[in-house]
């Protein structure tokens, strides 16, 4: 049932029916914020036993003899480095474990490059007209970091297997002002794309025109599966070993959506050469992060298998929510040909492509009925989605029942926006 092929009488009837249904939603006075991918209270409750892993009688001395209660060990306790290293498949001595925020570590990397330069290169603050590649749709907080330091953000289209690598190579290998690239290789935010092995290898094989070019590899969702047999891409570190490009990658990870969003642990994996500079610079900023929290995480999980088992509990809570979103989109919008969407195997988001020119209107209608979504355009640099089409749906926080009601409203708002476009 293509809306554009319907008679004026049918369109007018649909407008009347959708408007009445919308006003009924407004009367409900909903209050739901789905602007960010927040873990639900039930997910957070999964980690509460971690609070009991340390008692006043327990020793807080690491296997290296460091006291977690005292100053020191700015790059993280060895037990936490081993745990993260096991998860990522990298050596523990190439892991820096910090506080709770991987975004802060990304900011730190920019800051060091900006003020002191990378590997002896000229600091970015003394170079002009610098650029940073941003796969789109992408993560607004990534864009904000690069924009904060004054780099020009270059949108790179996302394809089914990762960013458009022909475009990436053209920029990176011919323009020395291109200093980096954002990547979310597993369940990309918000598209859910998993980079193919071929794309991972092409990234590792890049020959940057700028020796201080770095790929910011945000592996935030590498263990956030909602299916039993997820696609496992080639590790970027293994690919880089093939091409001798280990220094080109900064790999980030955190437990923000694994344990507590505000009290997890974050880490960055780097080559030994990069780690030497990063550790030196970070040693100026802090004498040490929260080592007690690092130890708490180690004792709660034990090893990488413990993390995997814990994430199965998350998947059991999240999959019904992803199913509700897809079910409602398939039921309400697919018959009308209204937009397209991904069906992710994990991560935290579903990416909806509305009819061109409708995204802002849909988000506005939802807000006026009590549901706050991620702002339209946020998944593009400078908030500028040229097609006004992409909307990031974050289904994780609401209950299944609340989410179903929210998706009823969302689909209704899509219909209203689409009907408004028909003259």
Image: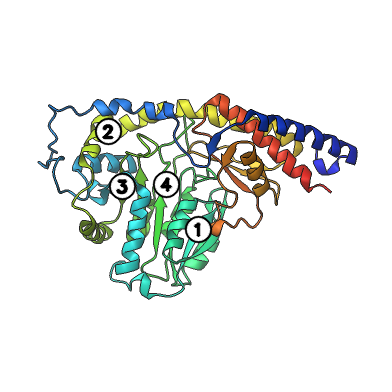
Label 1 belongs to which residue? 134
- What's the mark number on residue 303? 2
Lower sequence index among marks 3 and 4: 4
Compared across the picture, whether 142 is left or right of 339 comes to: left
In front: mark 1 or mark 2? 1
Q: Are marks 4 and 1 in contact (CB under 8 Å)?
A: no
Label 3 belongs to which residue? 267
Query: Marks 3 and 1, how far apart in space?
Result: 22 Å
Q: Residues within 10 Å of mark 4 (few under 14, many from 20)?
A: some
Q: Residues within 10 Å of mark 3 (few under 14, many from 20)?
A: many
Where residue 158 appears, x then y in whole percent? 56, 53
Label 4 belongs to which residue? 234
Lower sequence index among marks 3 and 2: 3
Query: Marks 4 and 1, how far apart in space?
Result: 21 Å
Compared across the picture, whether 232 is left or right of 74 comes to: right
Residue at 53% of width from left, 37% of height from top? 33
Q: Residues within 10 Å of mark 1 (few under 14, many from 20)?
A: many
Question: Can residue 407 be spotted in the picture?
Answer: yes
């Amino acid at each position: 049932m293509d809306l554009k092929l319907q008679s004026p009488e049918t369109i007018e009837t649909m407008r009347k029916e959708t408007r009445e249904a919308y006003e009924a939603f407004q009367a409900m006075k909903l209050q739901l914020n789905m602007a960010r991918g927040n873990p639900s209270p039930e997910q957070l409750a999964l980690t509460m036993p971690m609070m009991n892993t340390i008692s006043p009688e327990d020793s807080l001395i690491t296997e290296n003899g460091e006291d977690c209660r005292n100053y020191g060990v700015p790059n993280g306790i060895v037990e936490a480095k081993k745990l993260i290293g096991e998860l990522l498949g990298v050596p523990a001595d190439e892991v820096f474990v910090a506080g709770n925020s991987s975004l802060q570590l990304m900011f730190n990397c920019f800051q060091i490059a900006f003020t002191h330069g990378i590997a002896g290169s000229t600091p970015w603050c003394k170079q002009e007209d610098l650029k940073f590649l941003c796969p789109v749709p992408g993560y607004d907080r990534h864009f904000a970091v690069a924009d904060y330091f004054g780099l020009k953000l270059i949108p790179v289209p996302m394809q089914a297997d990762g960013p458009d690598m022909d475009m990436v190579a053209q920029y990176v290998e011919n323009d020395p002002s291109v200093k980096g690239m954002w990547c979310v290789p597993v369940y990309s935010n918000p598209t859910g794309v998993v980079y193919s092995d071929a794309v991972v290898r092409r990234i590792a094989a890049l020959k940057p025109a700028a020796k201080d070019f770095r790929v910011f590899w945000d592996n935030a969702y590498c263990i956030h599966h909602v299916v039993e047999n997820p696609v496992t891409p080639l590790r970027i570190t293994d690919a880089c070993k093939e091409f001798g490009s280990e220094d080109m990658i900064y790999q980030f990870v955190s437990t923000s959506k694994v344990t507590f969003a505000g009290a997890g642990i974050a880490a960055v994996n780097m080559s030994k050469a990069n780690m030497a500079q990063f550790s030196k610079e970070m040693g100026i900023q802090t004498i040490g992060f929260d080592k007690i929290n690092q130890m708490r995480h180690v004792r709660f999980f034990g090893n990488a298998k413990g993390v995997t088992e814990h994430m199965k509990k998350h998947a059991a809570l999240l999959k019904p929510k992803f199913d509700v979103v897809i079910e409602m989109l398939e039921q309400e919008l697919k018959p009308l040909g209204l937009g397209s969407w991904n069906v992710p195997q994990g991560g935290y988001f579903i990416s909806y492509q509305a009819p061109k020119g409708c995204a802002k209107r849909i988000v506005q209608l939802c807000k006026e009925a009590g549901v706050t979504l991620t702002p339209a355009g946020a998944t593009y640099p400078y908030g500028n989605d040229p097609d006004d089409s992409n909307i990031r749906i974050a289904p994780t926080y609401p209950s299944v029942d609340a989410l179903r009601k929210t998706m009823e409203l969302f689909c209704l708002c899509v219909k209203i926006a689409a009907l408004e476009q028909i003259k």
